[in-house]
Amino acid sequence: MTGSEGSTSLSAREAARLLRQRLEMGGGELFLDGMTRDEVLQQAARALTDQESDGGGGFDRNEVSAPGGLGSAAVAPEAARVTKGVSEEAAVAPSLLPDDYEALREMAMACTRCGLSSGRTRVVFSDGPSAARLMVVGEAPGANEDASGVPFVGMAGQFLDLLLATVALSRQDSVYIANVLKCRPPGNRDPQPDEIAACSPFLLKQIDLVKPRALLAVGSFSARLLTGREGVALGKLRGTVHTYHGVPLVVTYHPAALLRNRRWIRLFWEDLQLLRSVIDDS
Ligand code: SF4
């Protein structure tokens, strides 16, 4: 979590702990759509009061129903199986890009490989330490990211920070974040295939250079790119440890999608538990 805690007296770390406790003890889901960061933290504080007053009754994680149409059956971490991502053969080889991290970054900052260069304010290369244990891969910059040059700084990014804190991960010291596209698509439309083909070598080279112990792909575009499972629904990819060039890869929902569909928050949290176990075992 970046920045000060503003007017709320609850710290991000405390909020993360409360959210983790609430999920573990079966508390009702939090409604976060349209909320500010402070409101998210206040909601988490309220969760403690609810939990204490209702005794925090248990729940069966397997009873969490999957959102319709995505085949998102909840999979317990202990039941997850390891598969080899077909992307290991299909990935675009970033062999023409520099092996030096700063040189790669400078090349991306000046890039005009695709049409998105004409509408961007800033190239959004990454955030977090380049020696991070975990690399989170998102989709593309939004308006806030385009303006700031930093990935995941809007409401979805703040929520991602909060959820990562529940498994003791932070972009301050252990998480590096990058997107499939470095420039904002107009109107936040989906990335186009030619844009992904043009930009993804930067991302793949970043993975090569950062050498994370684990990868977390959030959203279908990064999940499909790194698993090589083009056209497969995200719900069918999550709950399993894939590999990308030997690096364990966990797939889950984009935090922005969690803000639209609160039922996915628990599934996301389960995927984080799987991720944490992968990191702890590596
Ligand atoms: S999106 Fe990627 S490929 Fe396209 S201009 Fe930006 S950095 Fe270059």
Image (tube, rainbow, N blue to C red):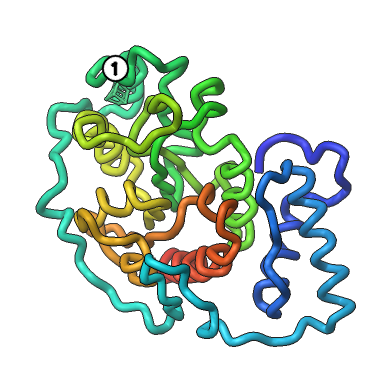
Q: Left of 229 or right of it: where is 263? A: right
Residue in the foreground of this view, choosing between 58 and 103 = 58
Question: 234 above or below 81?
Answer: above
Q: Residues within 10 Å of mark 1 (few under 14, many from 20)?
A: some
| Residue ID for mark 1 | 111
Q: Is residue 173 left or right of residue 77?
A: right
Q: Residue furthest front?
A: 68
Quick check: 73 left or right of 65? left
Does the numbered disc 1 mark a residue whose Cβ is under 8 Å from ligand 1? yes
Task: Determine the image quadrant of residue 44.
Answer: bottom right
Disc 1, SS = loop
**Image quadrant occupied by the N terminus:** top right
Which residue is at a point 25% across and 48% down the rendered structure image? Answer: 225
Task: Tell me the quadrant of the picture where the C terminus can be found.
Answer: bottom left
Q: Is residue 181 above or below residue 112?
A: below
Amino acid type, mark 1: Cys
Q: Residue at x 64, y 52 (%)?
A: 162
Residue 241: % across, % down: 33, 68
For the point 33% across and 29% down, the residue is 101
Ligand 1 falls in quadrant: top left
Q: Position of residue 229 (x, y in %)?
A: 21, 58
Place of residue 230 in the rendered image (x, y in percent of width and height, measured from the top left): 20, 54
Residue 107 placement (x, y as % from top left): 29, 18
Residue shown at 32%/65% (left/top)?
A: 237
Name above or below for residue 35 compared with residue 4: below
Total number of numbered discs in the rendering: 1
Q: Nearer the viewer, residue 33 or 251?
A: 33
Q: Residue furthest left?
A: 89
Using the rendered view, name the quadrant where residue 120 is placed. Answer: top left
